[in-house]
Image (cartoon, rainbow, N blue to C red):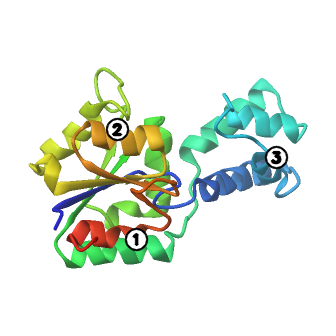
Amino acid sequence: MKQLVILDLDDTIYSERDYFSGVFSSYEQANELDSGSLLRAFDSINRKESRDILREALTMASSYTPQNHDLLFLLYSTAEFAINLPQSSSRFLEILKSNQIRTAVLTNGVVDVQKNKVRNLGLEAHVDKVFYARENSEKYEKPDIRCFQNVLEFFDCKPENALMIGDSYNNDYLGGRNAQIASLWLHGNNSESIQVLEEAIPFIFGTKQ
């Protein structure tokens, strides 16, 4: 049985779209913009190729100015609204907790933004520790193996006693494997992929055939 499960945040524990939806709603209410216009724009953006999602969403909603972009980014870092943790995630984390398996979240991205997501999710009540990858003097992020090693060191856990789960093949799956941690690719398409978090349970408890 694994002693530690390390999870990515965005699109692993919850859908990041829920966070953008809350940010956009806060902006629209403050600026008397048509409700839902930014989210509709967001849904049409190729997020993997976008260099500035907020700018693209504003542009597509015919609302871009540098001032509007600054305001939207401020809300992206600070807006307060509740995000419901998906039941599947809550159930998965409760199973781990009830079996004394430690849980960590390891997330890339702008630290203030990621901290605001965690606050709005109320996530710290559900996991043992949240690690923000850029919160180090050299600003390295996943898939740098030092990110994973920092988590292992905090929990005094050997790599073979941990499991990494995330939706990014490079950052989470390969990053974890390169740190000698067994890894699962959420929503992936290889033999070490799962489609929902609870499919990781046999890997965690050592019952996977």
Q: Nearer the viewer, residue 112 or 96?
A: 96
In the shown orientation, is residue 62 left or right of residue 129? right
What residue do we see at 70% from left, 53% from top? 26
Q: Amino acid at mark 3?
A: Ala
Helix, strand or loop at mark 3: helix
Q: Which residue is mark 1?
A: 199
Question: Percent from the top left, x then y, of residue 139?
Answer: 36, 24
The structure residue drawn at horizontal position 68% and vertical position 56%, both measured from the top left corner, is: 21
Q: In front here: 25 or 206?
A: 206
Q: CA distance from mark 3 to mark 1?
A: 33 Å
Q: Is residue 59 visible?
A: yes
- What amino acid is labelled 2 in the image? Gly
Q: Is residue 56 left or right of residue 199?
A: right
30 and 69: which one is in front? 69
The residue carrying mark 2 is: 175
Q: Earlier in the sequence, mark 3 or mark 1?
A: 3
Counting other residues with Cα less than 10 Å from the Cα at mark 2, is it few (<14), some (14-19), or many (20 or more)? many
Task: Identify the residue under disc 3.
Answer: 41
152 horizontally vs 95: left or right: left
Q: Marks 3/2: CA distance?
A: 32 Å
Viewer-side label of 3, 2: 2
The quadrant where residue 61 appears: top right
Q: Which mark lies nearer to you, 3 or 1?
A: 1
- Whether the residues at callouts 2 and 1 have beta carbons within 8 Å, the answer is no
